Amino acid sequence: MEIKTGTNRIYIEDNGKEIGEITFSPAGEGMIIIDHTGVNNDYRNQGLAKQLVYKAADYARENNLLVVPLCPYAKSVFEKDVSLHDLVKKKTPLGVFLRRRDTMWIIITINVISYLLMGFDKIQAIHKRYRIPELVFFVLSAFSGFMGIFMAMYVFRHKNRKPKFIFMIVFGALLFGIASYQVLK
């Protein structure tokens, strides 16, 4: 068996037959993403996949690259082996939060709350009672609630003729987009 390096991949050959590979792609300057590790079924449980991950780690060290292990197997090897931790691209705590599975539910919840508050504010306006300050809607839009606000503006026909309010919500949505981009890059 021989381990060889190709373009954006490292593979193992046995008597001229490719039996396993790890693939990676460049991700900006000084970084690679490991996206796949696979070994032929006949050669499983022999530690070949782990050898490929370590060879990819050696490649990253030789070329002064950080690694983002997206492949589940490579990710588990990088997490378990302390000697590989220096190669892993560090995430910000907020970045880790935004990548979690429940993030979508948080965003949906904020939008539902925004929608309901806009409906409540419409009822308050009709009955000439205390209103929700527009700053509250701006903050909600900056924390991803802009979709719920725009939907409520359309459904309830509330604050849809106030250019200042619309600009404020669009600006909040842009802030959310810029902050998300900065955290996730």
Image: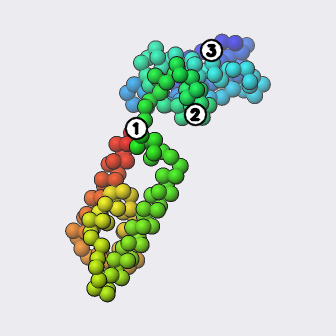
Q: Residue under circle 1?
A: 92
- In what quadrant of the picture does the N terminus appear? top right
Q: Position of residue 60 (x, y in %)?
A: 48, 20
* Cβ atoms at labels 1 and 2 below 8 Å apart: no
> What is the number of the mark on residue 71?
2
Q: Secondary structure at mark 2?
A: loop
Please, is residue 139 above or below residue 89 in the view?
A: below
Q: How many residues crowd around disc 3 within 10 Å: few (fewer than 14), some, or many (20 or more)? A: some
* Cβ atoms at labels 2 and 3 below 8 Å apart: no
State the residue at coordinates (63%, 22%): 50
Earlier-in-chain disc, 2 versus 3: 3
- In what quadrant of the picture does the C terminus appear? top left
Q: Secondary structure at mark 3?
A: strand
User: What kind of residue is marked 3?
Assistant: Ile
Earlier-in-chain disc, 3 versus 1: 3
Please, is residue 136 above or below residue 82 in the view?
A: below
User: What kind of residue is marked 1?
Assistant: Thr
Q: How many residues crowd around disc 1 within 10 Å: few (fewer than 14), some, or many (20 or more)? A: few
Q: Is residue 86 left or right of residue 171?
A: right
Residue 23: quarter of image: top right
Please state which of the two labelled residues, at mark 2 or mark 3, is closer to the viewer. Answer: 2
Disc 1/disc 2 C-alpha distance (Å): 20 Å
Most foreground residue, 152 or 28: 152
Residue 16: quarter of image: top right
Q: Position of residue 105 (x, y in %)?
A: 50, 57
> Is residue 35 visible to the viewer in this orientation of the structure?
no
Q: Residue under circle 3?
A: 3
Earlier-in-chain disc, 1 versus 2: 2
> Is residue 132 visible to the viewer in this orientation of the structure?
yes
